Image (spheres, grey):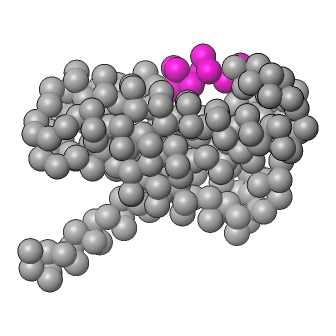
Amino acid sequence: MTAEHRSETRAQRIALVALFAALMAAFGLIPKIDLPLGVPITAQTMGVMLAGCMLGAAMGFQALLLFLAAVALGLPLLSGGRGGMGVFFLPSAGYLLSYPLAAAVAGLVMRNLAGKGPSSPMRLAACAFVASVLGGIVVVHVFGVVGLMLLAKLSLVQAAVGTLVFVPGDLVKCVLVALIVHTVARGLPDWRFGGRRL
């Protein structure tokens, strides 16, 4: 690989990381639904799932880390125009802090399930659904429950029951991510879903 090609590849990676961080911000424009639990229903977990499935573990992690860094600096990128360090001390903080790891897990699962070589769009969509469930639901909700226990002072049972209200909507997001992956796989068959090797 020539130095010019390495530079071009690195520039492409940076652009994709920035693009998916911006996509997370765009999902933040969709109005949130506030719940008594102190954790709103938002569309942004779908961005976490997409980043992992589309970019892979490393770039997905970087994209979500970049997004959270921008939020910490005060940019109002979360649903409802929220931002600043204060959001990391609210009951929803566990969910937010899970985003980079959740994207990384989704990316690893996507890569391992998709394997090497070409795959049919339908198979890739199924892989994306499973990756989204494991990364975007399991990881996010484990962190979320811990956050509710520490910051909202809920018991384990209360936090676990409280987080269940999000699961039906999250499953719908997993289906939407699978449909997006299916569409991209048909239009861009060389896309390296989950960072897999072709």
Residue 162, given in percent of the width and then of the height, sits at 78, 23
Query: Number of labelled discs?
Result: 0
- Most extreme residue toward the front is 156
Question: What residue is shown at x 44% (from left), y 48% (from top)?
Answer: 104
Looking at the rendering, which quadrant does residue 119 occupy? top left
| Horizontal and vertical percent position of residue 142 | 64, 35
Using residue 50 as the reference point, say whether residue 12 is left or right of it: left
Q: Position of residue 43 (x, y in %)?
A: 59, 35
Residue placed furthest toward the top: 168
- When the figure is inspected, residue 83 is found, relative to residue 129, above or below; the finding is below
Name the dominant secondary structure of the magenta segment. helix
Check if residue 170 falls in the magenta segment. Answer: yes
Q: Residue at x 56, y 37 (%)?
A: 139
In the image, residue 68 above or below residue 121: below
Q: Nearer the viewer, residue 103 or 190?
A: 103
Given residues 64 and 117, the one toward you in this image is: 117
- Residue 169, can we see it? yes
Residue lying farthest bottom? 3
Q: Residue at x 60, y 16 (%)?
A: 168
Q: Which residues are magenta?
A: 165-173
User: With respect to residue 59, does 107 lie above or below?
Assistant: above
Residue in the picture at 80% in, 28% down: 156
- The answer to whether residue 135 is left or right of residue 141 is left
Q: Nearer the viewer, residue 2 or 148?
A: 148
Residue 181's x, y, as percent? Answer: 31, 33
Quarter that holds the N terminus: bottom left
Residue 156 shown left or right of residue 55 in the figure:
right
Report if residue 54 is visible in the image.
no
Report if residue 148 lies within the magenta region. Answer: no
- The residue closer to the viewer here, 169 or 96, is 96
